[in-house]
């Protein structure tokens, strides 16, 4: 009896003292251990994180304009830093759910731009082509023939989601690729946080499309949503010319998770680990030229920052 009573009292005392410790050191409850390498940003981190601004700028104006009808100039002009307005961006005809999700994505990109620019500095918004004509060309290139009528990314939710399929995925594989070359603890924290949200965006876009995978994309009679994703993924693999690092929504089982699925809501390798790409591979894709030294596509004047400029042929 005595023993159990004193054990109870001891537990009570311990609880009380932990409670008091908790109260008196409230801040230490959430404190973060000192990183083993206590350097926030390595000089070599800066160019890699700034490189991502090219994609984050594309995404910010793409999602903001599509959902809201206006972009970074209206939402966060200080992040534009005097760069020119995006070419051909406009409001898309979206259903309410898609519109709400895309608006959220747009605002998330504003946060990403702020996070990068305030951590490692940055450059003005580059010239970005978000015109319907440019997206139509991408899908024509993807299919290898001219879609008639030309694909209009702003026409409806499905078209907008198909066009959105093109962008965050490239950002996410770029972050995975940059990771081994980033060394500072603050840079790593930023990269992981950006990667997580880009992956989330890509997953949401792909899930919304997967729900309609077998639907025909009107008015193209026998081309389904899944066909569009497969063709875009094939085009990106071709432009980057470094093997298969990009898979559509429906795949042969040998490409599915553990060789068990034909669904492919997330694109990943044989161990379901995300693919990675280098800045050069990414530029080959977003330029649409297959050459990191020849600008075009989304970035008609090329990307900004030391990495993209260093790869330009006539820089
Ligand atoms: C979409 O949102 C608008 C405005 O909030 C509302 O009037 C309309 O009923 C909604 N439509 C659907 C299908 O929920
Ligand atoms: C359907 O696709 C086939 C090729 O897969 C093509 O030859 C045919 O013209 C298409 N039909 C229509 C109506 O688009
Ligand atoms: C799935 O198949 C591929 C060959 O197509 C093979 O390389 C891989 O090891 C297989 N994965 C599993 C988990 O069996």
Image: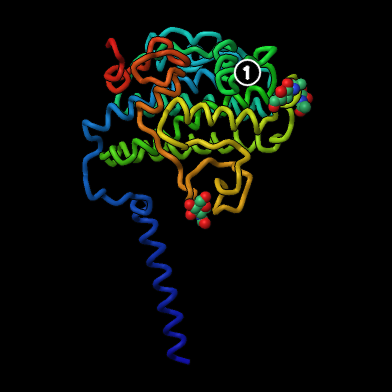
Q: Is residue 120 visible?
A: yes
Q: Who's the residue at 60% across and 26% down the image?
A: 102
- Measured as percent of width and height from the top left, residue 294 is found at 37, 14
Is 19 placed above or below 223 here?
below
Q: Residue at x 46, y 47 (%)?
A: 273
- The residue positioned 39% from the left and 65% from the top of the image is 18
Question: Measuring 54% from the left and 19% from the top, which residue is drawn there?
Answer: 62
Q: Which residue is mark 1?
A: 153
Across and down, in percent, residue 106 comes to: 53, 24
**x, y percentage for residue 226?**
65, 33
Residue furthest to the bottom in view is: 1
Is 13 situated above or below 271?
A: below
Visible residue check, residue 95: no
Which of the pair 267/46 is nearer the observer?
267
Tag 1 secondary structure = loop
For ligand 2, the image quadrant comes to: top right
Residue 252 place in picture, x, y as percent: 60, 44
Q: Nearer the viewer, residue 142 or 125?
A: 142
Front-most of residues 28 and 85 = 85
Label 1 neighbour load within 10 Å: few <14, some 14-19, many 20+: many
Q: Relative to 254, is 84 on the left or the right?
A: left
């Amino acid at each position: 009896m005595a023993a159990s009573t004193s054990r109870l009292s001891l537990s009570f005392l311990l609880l009380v003292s932990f409670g008091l410790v908790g109260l008196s050191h409230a801040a230490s409850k959430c404190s973060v251990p000192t990183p083993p390498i206590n350097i926030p940003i390595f000089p070599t981190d800066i160019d890699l994180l700034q490189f991502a601004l090219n994609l984050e700028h594309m995404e910010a104006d793409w999602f903001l304009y599509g959902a809201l009808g206006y972009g970074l100039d209206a939402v966060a002009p200080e992040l534009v830093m005097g760069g020119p307005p995006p070419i051909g961006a406009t409001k898309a005809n979206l259903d309410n759910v898609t519109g709400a999700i895309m608006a959220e994505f747009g605002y998330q990109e504003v946060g990403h731009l702020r996070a990068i620019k305030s951590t490692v500095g940055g450059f003005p918004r580059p010239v970005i082509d978000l015109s319907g004509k440019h997206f139509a060309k991408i899908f024509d290139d993807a299919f290898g023939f001219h879609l008639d009528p030309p694909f209009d990314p702003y026409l409806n939710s499905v078209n907008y989601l198909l066009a959105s399929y093109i962008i965050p995925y490239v950002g996410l594989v770029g972050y995975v690729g940059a990771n081994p070359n980033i060394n500072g603890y603050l840079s790593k924290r930023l990269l992981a946080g950006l990667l997580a949200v880009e992956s989330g965006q890509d997953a949401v876009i792909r899930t919304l499309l997967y729900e309609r995978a077998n639907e025909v994309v009107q008015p193209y009679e026998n081309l389904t949503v899944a066909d569009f994703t497969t063709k875009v993924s094939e085009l990106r693999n071709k432009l980057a010319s470094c093997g298969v690092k990009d898979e559509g929504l429906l795949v042969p089982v040998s490409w599915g998770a553990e060789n068990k699925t034909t669904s492919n809501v997330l694109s990943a390798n044989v161990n379901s680990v995300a693919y990675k790409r280098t800045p050069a591979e990414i530029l080959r894709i977003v330029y649409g030229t297959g050459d990191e030294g020849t600008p075009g596509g989304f970035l008609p004047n090329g990307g900004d920052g030391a990495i993209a400029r260093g790869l330009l042929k006539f820089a």
